[in-house]
Each structure stands twice: as C-alpha cells, then as structure tokens.
Image: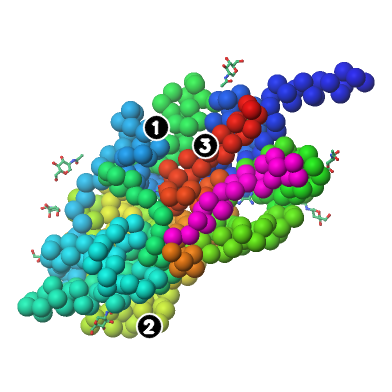
Amino acid sequence: MLVALIIPLIESVRNGPSILIIGAGPSGIAAATKLLKNNYTSIKIFEAEDRIGGRIRSVEFGDAFVDLGAEWCHGEKENIVYDMINQYNVLRHTNLSYKLVYSNGKYIDDDVYQALIDFADSIDASVTNEETEKNCQGLQSIGECFQKQFNASFTKRYSTDSGKLKLAVDSADWLECYMATYDSTFSLQDLSRRSNYKRCEGDLRLNWNGRGYKTILELMMQKFPDTSKQLPLDERIVLRKEVTKILWRHNNSKVVVQSSGNGSDEFDHVIFTPSLGVLKASHDSLFDPPLSVEKVTAIRNFGFGATFKIAMHFPKTWWNVSELYGFVWSAEDEKKITSDFPEGPFKNGRSWLTTSTKFFQAEHNPKVMIAFFAGEMVPDLEKESDQVLIDGCMYLFKTFLGSNYSVVEPDSIIRSSWYTNPHFRGTYSYESVKGGSGSRYPEELGKPLRNEDERPTVLFAGEATHPYYFSTVHGAIESGYREADRLINLYSS
Ligand SMILES: Cc1cc2nc3c(=O)[nH]c(=O)nc-3n(C[C@H](O)[C@H](O)[C@H](O)COP(=O)(O)OP(=O)(O)OC[C@H]3O[C@@H](n4cnc5c(N)ncnc54)[C@H](O)[C@@H]3O)c2cc1C
Ligand SMILES: *[C@@H]1O[C@H](CO)[C@@H](O)[C@H](O)[C@H]1NC(C)=O
Ligand SMILES: *[C@@H]1O[C@H](CO)[C@@H](O)[C@H](O)[C@H]1NC(C)=O
Ligand SMILES: *[C@@H]1O[C@H](CO)[C@@H](O)[C@H](O)[C@H]1NC(C)=O
Ligand SMILES: *[C@@H]1O[C@H](CO)[C@@H](O)[C@H](O)[C@H]1NC(C)=O
Ligand SMILES: *[C@@H]1O[C@H](CO)[C@@H](O)[C@H](O)[C@H]1NC(C)=O
Ligand SMILES: *[C@@H]1O[C@H](CO)[C@@H](O)[C@H](O)[C@H]1NC(C)=O
Ligand SMILES: *[C@@H]1O[C@H](CO)[C@@H](O)[C@H](O)[C@H]1NC(C)=O
C-alpha cells in the first residue's frame, strides 16, 4: 500500500512536474525541446492538426520543399533562428530582381518602383521618418497616412513627368497590397502607425534553399543535421488531439484539460501556444474560469489577419527565373476585368485580380511559381475552386507577361487556408489601431495564469506573446524558450 503510493511520487520527483504543451508549432517545439534537454521528461504535446509545425508548413512540391506558411528568416542580428542555423550553411540570400509590370506588358521604370518602396518605408511603423511624423500627425493608421501622403508625395516628385505620375498613381492599389502583405492585415486602415515591432538587422529575406522552413524544427528536435542524436520528442506528441477546455482552477493542484474524443487529463502545468486567431474565436469556451478583463482586452485589440499563397507547378519554366513580378493595372485596363474575367470575388467594384502582390520562382524549383494575394478578399479566395484560381492567374500572366513569354497553364497547384482553418484563423499578429499608440498587448498575452498560491499553472507562448518580435518564427521560438525557462526556474529555486 505504502509502496503503491510512494512509487508514483518518486516517479514524479524524478521526471519533474507533468507539463502539457498545447500546439506543435515552433513555440511549442521550442518549449518541449528545452524542457527535455533540462531533464523534464514528463511532458506531452497535444496537437490538433495531423502534422507538426503549425504555421511552418513545408510541403514537397515539384523538385523541393515549398512553404505555405513561414518562408524567410527575417534578419541576421539578434535573430535566434539565424543564430541557431547559421553554422550549417543552409540559408541563402534571395537573389531576385524585383520588377513591376504594367498591364500593357511593359516594365514600370525601376526608379518609379524604387520611389514606391521608399514611400512605403517612409510610412512604415517600425521606421521613424521626420517628414511623415509632421505630415501624418494625429493620424492613427498607416492607411490614413498613406491616403493623405501618397498623391501629394508623387505629384511633387513627378511634377514634370506626367507619364511617371500616372504610373505611380496607378500603382497605389498594388502598393497597398504589398504593404498589407507584410503585416498580413486585411486593411491598412486597421494597421497602427505605432508599433513595438523590431526588425532585425541584415537580410530580411533569407531563404531555406529548397529545404523548407521546417529545417528549424528538425534542428531544435536534433533530427538535423544528424538524426541519430534526436531528442525523445516524437513519442510525446499526440496528433489530431484538439484541446477544447482548460479547467485551470479546478482544484488547487492540477490543471484539467479536456480534448477531442472526450478525453480528460491532468497536468501540473500547461503551456498554451495556439494563435491569437484561435484565442479571439474560442477563449470564452476554452478557459474555465474565464480569462481576466485585461487579457480579453488584449486578445480583442491586438490585430490578426491573413494573406493567401498559391504554389503553381508548370510543365515547363516559361518565365525569367531571376525576376520577381508585381502586377500593376492601369485604371483603363482594370475596368475591363469585369467583362473579361468576372469569376472569383469582387469587393467595392474591385476584382481579386487586383490584389496580387508578387509572383516568383520557388528556390531550387524551376517549374514552381509562388503567388501572394493580400487584403480583404483573402477569406473569399481561400474558398475559391482551384480552377478559378488557375484561370485567374492565367489571365494575369497573359495580360502582364504574355507579350514576352509563352505562358503555359499550371498542371497542379497547392494553396494555403490559414484563415479558414479553425486551428489558426489567420496568419500572424500585428499592432492594430485599437491598441492606441504602441500597445503592451503582447506582454499581457504572455502573462501566465496563476493559482491561489501564485504558482503559474497555465503559461502562454506563441508569436503574439513576444513584446517586439511578434508575427515571426524567431519571436515564436524565443517565446517558447521563455516559458520553458519560467518552469525550469520555478523548480530550481
Ligand atoms: C502565410 C504565412 C507566412 C509567414 N511568413 C513568415 C516568414 O516569412 N518569416 C517568419 O519569421 N514568420 C512568418 N510567418 C509567421 C510564423 O509562421 C508564425 O509566427 C509562427 O509559426 C508562429 O508559431 P507559434 O508556435 O506561435 O504558432 P503556430 O505555428 O500556429 O502553432 C500553434 C499550434 O497549435 C495548434 N492548435 C491550435 N489550436 C489547438 C487546440 N485547440 N488544441 C491543440 N492544438 C491546437 C495549431 O494546429 C498549431 O500547430 C508566416 C506565417 C504564415 C501563415
Ligand atoms: C540531465 O540528466 C543527465 C543524466 O542523469 C545528466 O548527466 C545531466 O547533467 C542532466 N542535465 C541537466 C540540465 O540537468
Ligand atoms: C546573386 O546576384 C549577384 C548579382 O546579380 C550575383 O553576382 C551572384 O552570383 C548571385 N548569387 C547567387 C547565389 O545566385
Ligand atoms: C517585354 O519586352 C519589351 C520589348 O523588349 C519590353 O519593352 C517590356 O518591358 C518587356 N516586358 C516584360 C514584362 O518583360
Ligand atoms: C490619387 O489621385 C487619384 C486621381 O486623382 C485618385 O483617383 C486616387 O484615389 C488618389 N489616391 C489616393 C491614395 O489618395
Ligand atoms: C483535483 O481534481 C482531480 C480531478 O477531479 C482529482 O482527481 C484530484 O484528486 C483533485 N485533487 C485535490 C487535491 O483535490
Ligand atoms: C462525447 O460525449 C458526448 C456526450 O456524452 C457524446 O454525445 C459524444 O458522442 C462523445 N464523443 C466522442 C468522440 O466520444
Ligand atoms: C532575366 O532577368 C534579368 C534581371 O532582370 C535580366 O538581367 C536578364 O537579361 C533576363 N533574361 C532574359 C533572357 O530576358
């Protein structure tokens, strides 16, 4: 009798507290691997999807891995992803020539393109620009500042060149989508001019050389570069297990977790990593007792949107592999879309075909082209059939590139559905105007729930909990390590 009681006790002391990590994205994998390396072996991951990786999703397509989620390592300084992978010589600079093409099939002059990008940078929230500060004083959103400044800025710049002025003015819609892509907002009107987001220095577009961003997960799990050293994590991951309720003050010792299939399990601690989108939709039903007013306010007011990606495989390479294309409609040609290609979503008279931001070849994948779309039509695009997407892209290719290239139809496509998928409900977080001037919402989102004796029971990791690297993989990984350390420190003190 005594032995029967003591053995589990000794087990629990030897293996440390029982810890459940919800979600096997980069933050969950980071937390799990750090705990394992510190001899916390009584850990589990419940993952709702049938795969690990979360918003890292590298799919074998064509000749290499293509990323439907995170794609680039953003920066080289103080970037944990870069620091971890650098010695293995995997990352490559993305070496593409950026080309804007007009709907008459001609390149838009490089200096107009550069002026547009400079304009975007000048109103970016993570950059301070004196002139913008003066001109956009009192305006909350990037969108308002854009509208106030755009025509004024280009009318001044091209006062003696009406041709370039027209090109620039016609490029405004493309530029809005381009900017919306960066923060994955549906509307620049919701994107705050004040943000604590910090760009890492160095190349912001380091690619994974056809191996996929998943390589960082393999590295953390010690499957890369040498499988024989892998951590004993696979057997601790339960796939297709969706957590539906977290009873965090059930009694004073354990957290009770209910999940799909009517399972119910108890843990000493839970690390919660699902996206801000999941929290927005389900915090009410997920947490019992409910979350604090402060946390709910942060969940409501921090921004979360989506972008849409398509990867297209062609029977042959027909484009110029060293170019990345952005397509700009002339005001006149745009009017023709309604009759020439009425399929797919329209909003406020604008076709989805005006919301593409870039087309470029995937690395080490000469027959695969990646396309990005942004803005408020993304949720509708996720629901469109493959055929409408293919037909629409073919219409774009013929219009913009058809005079110089023999365009052929893709033979297969893969596509993202981050907004529609209930385990994500979008792509990544951003500072919305609802937060006022640079909120502290990520810090609030990262605060643990504590029981009566102040012990942290439910901990929060995930990109949206990082004070200045939110929205990125490096932010997600740092947040996972942070919460693992919180527990390690708790038990070592
Ligand atoms: C299209 C796209 C492009 C991106 N591009 C880049 C980029 O180039 N560079 C960059 O640094 N970042 C990029 N990101 C952002 C990056 O992917 C994310 O910041 C990062 O993956 C977030 O990791 P996470 O662990 O916080 O969350 P996630 O990766 O979302 O992991 C959370 C996990 O929780 C699971 N889950 C959800 N609900 C439940 C539940 N109820 N029960 C159990 N499990 C659940 C989910 O299935 C998921 O696997 C991109 C994201 C997207 C979608
Ligand atoms: C983990 O346990 C091993 C074997 O008992 C020991 O050698 C190692 O030092 C421990 N590591 C930590 C971080 O405690
Ligand atoms: C990148 O582009 C530069 C200049 O166009 C070229 O010199 C270099 O070889 C390219 N690098 C790769 C890896 O293609
Ligand atoms: C196509 O070629 C013409 C003539 O050389 C050139 O003016 C135009 O910019 C090119 N367009 C593209 C998209 O390459
Ligand atoms: C700029 O001016 C054009 C033409 O007068 C107008 O149609 C457009 O809406 C303006 N764009 C912005 C961003 O204000
Ligand atoms: C806490 O609740 C669980 C689940 O109902 C129960 O098994 C356990 O004995 C309770 N512990 C205490 C200390 O009440
Ligand atoms: C879970 O329990 C409910 C009610 O007891 C039952 O209706 C449902 O079928 C169960 N679901 C599963 C997957 O067992
Ligand atoms: C492909 O694009 C590059 C960069 O714009 C250009 O230098 C090169 O001449 C193009 N090649 C062909 C065959 O058009």
Q: Which mark is residue 349?
A: 2
Residue bearing the label numbered 1? 84
The residue beneath circle 3 is 481
Q: Nearer the viewer, mark 2 or mark 3?
A: 3
Q: CA distance from mark 3 to mark 1?
A: 13 Å
Q: Is residue 330 visible?
A: no
Q: Amino acid at mark 1?
A: Met
The image quadrant that residue 400 belongs to is bottom left
Mark 2, secondary structure of its residue: loop
Give x and y (percent) for residue 292: 67, 58
Q: Name the residue located 47 percent from the left edge and 50 percent from the top edge.
A: 467
Task: Give 176 or 366, whichever is nearer the viewer.
Answer: 176
| Image quarter in which the C terminus is found | top right
Report helix, strand or loop for mark 3: helix
The residue stretch that appears in magenta:
438-460
- Which percent across, then down, holds residue 457? 69, 42
- In the visual, does 359 lie left or right of 67? left
Q: Is residue 280 magenta?
A: no
Residue type (three-letter) at the residue carrying disc 2: Gly
> In the image, is the residue at mark 3 within 8 Å of ligand 1 by its beta carbon?
no
Q: How is the image coloured?
A: rainbow
Q: Who's the residue at 36% across and 68% down the image?
A: 142
Judging from the image, what secondary structure is the residue with disc 1 in?
helix
Mark 2 near mark 3, Cβ–Cβ under 8 Å? Answer: no
Quarter of the image with the N terminus is top right
